[in-house]
Amino acid sequence: MQTVVDLTRCQGYAQCVFLAPEVFELHGEEGLLYATAVPDDQVERVRQAAAACPVQAILLGEGVSAGVR
């Protein structure tokens, strides 16, 4: 599974970091780093993170790309 974060929507609430710290990481106060390829053992956590994102900035699936909803 792939993940993409629409950084134009992301507001830095960091729900993804709390729910899937192996995939998402805050860099500084507002910069978000993330793995685009989700390891199999992290898929459920990333799904939870996407569901918890208040601005729905996390896209999941195969072949997802930024700016495509």
Image: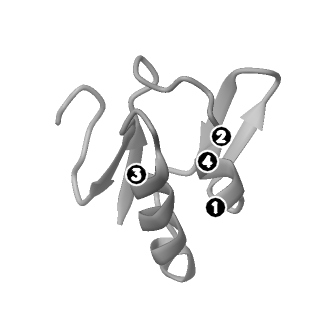
The first of marks 1 and 3 along the sequence is 3
Q: Amino acid at mark 2?
A: Ala
What number is the disc on residue 15?
4
Could you classify mark 2 by the number of other residues whose Cα lies within 10 Å: few (under 14), some (14-19), or many (20 or more)?
many
Q: Which residue is mark 2?
A: 14
Q: Measured from the top left, where is residue 49 in percent x and y?
A: 51, 57
Find the distance from the CA under tag 1 to the CA under tag 3: 14 Å
Residue 62, relative to residue 68: is it above or below? Answer: below
Camera-nearest residue between 15 and 59: 15
Q: Indicate which label's residue lies in the foreground, 2 or 3.
A: 2
Q: Which residue is mark 1?
A: 19
Task: Name the residue rendered at 54%, 70% in the picture.
Answer: 45
Could you classify mark 1 by the number of other residues whose Cα lies within 10 Å: few (under 14), some (14-19), or many (20 or more)?
some
Mark 4 vs 1: CB contact within 8 A: yes
Find the distance from the CA under tag 3 to the CA under tag 4: 15 Å
Query: What kind of element bears circle 3?
Result: strand
**Which of the 4 quarters of the picture holds residue 65?**
top left
The first of marks 3 and 4 along the sequence is 3
Find the distance from the CA under tag 1 to the CA under tag 2: 9 Å
Find the distance from the CA under tag 4 to the CA under tag 1: 6 Å
Find the distance from the CA under tag 2 to the CA under tag 4: 4 Å
Could you classify mark 3 by the number of other residues whose Cα lies within 10 Å: few (under 14), some (14-19), or many (20 or more)?
many
Residue 43, relative to residue 38: is it above or below? Answer: below
Relative to residue 48, is residue 64 drawn left or right? left
Query: What kind of element bears circle 4?
Result: helix
**Which of the 4 quarters of the picture holds residue 27?**
top right
Query: What kind of element bears circle 2?
Result: loop
Q: Indicate which label's residue lies in the foreground, 3 or 4.
A: 4
